[in-house]
């Protein structure tokens, strides 16, 4: 009888190690996702006229608008400042998420 990849009837040892690494990596990813969800990210626009706070779950916690930023004759400017602050806050969440995933070293040697 020939050899079957160095094992007889069971999982090869390197496959078992690979499974353990995958499980460890999955646990790390879940922990990092939970950690990210607890963080808050703040962004401002218009020199501080608009402040936005968003959680790591990309849920808005607050939007503060300075009274002097509210000009009934220039609503578009206020809208632009709000959009700029919201987009910057969401970019910060994505950047932190990517940074956290990068600390895992790619696929942790799985490939």
Image (tube, rainbow, N blue to C red):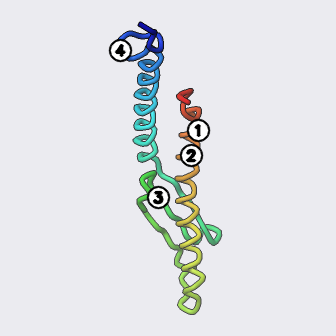
Q: Are marks 2 and 1 in contact (CB under 8 Å)?
A: yes
Residue located beneath label 4 in the image: 10
Real-space CA distance between mark 2 and mark 3, rounded to the nearest whole angstrom: 17 Å
Q: Residues within 10 Å of mark 2 (few under 14, many from 20)?
A: few
Residue 43, position in %: x, y?
57, 61
Q: Which residue occupies 60% across, 82% down?
A: 77
Side of 47 where 68 appears, left or right? left
Marking on residue 54: 3
Pick the front one: 61 or 32:
32
Say which label, 4 or 2, has the lower sequence index: 4
24 is higher (above) or lower (below) than 29: above
Real-space CA distance between mark 1 and mark 4, rounded to the nearest whole angstrom: 34 Å
Residue located beneath label 1 in the image: 102
Which secondary structure lies at badge 2?
Answer: helix
Image quadrant occupied by the N terminus: top left
Residue located beneath label 2 in the image: 98
In front of the other: label 1 or label 3?
Answer: 1
Pick the front one: 94 or 16:
16
Say which label, 1 or 3, has the lower sequence index: 3
């Amino acid at each position: 009888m020939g050899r079957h990849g160095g094992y007889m009837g069971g999982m090869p040892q390197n496959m078992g190690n690979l499974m353990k690494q995958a499980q460890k990596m999955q646990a790390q990813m879940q922990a990092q996702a939970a950690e990210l969800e607890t963080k808050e990210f703040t962004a401002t626009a218009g020199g501080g006229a608009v402040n936005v706070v968003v959680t790591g779950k990309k849920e808005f916690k607050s939007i503060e608008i300075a009274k002097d930023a509210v000009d009934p004759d220039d609503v578009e400017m206020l809208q632009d400042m709000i959009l700029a602050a919201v987009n910057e806050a969401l970019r910060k969440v994505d950047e932190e998420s990517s940074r956290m995933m990068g600390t895992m070293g790619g696929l942790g040697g799985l490939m």
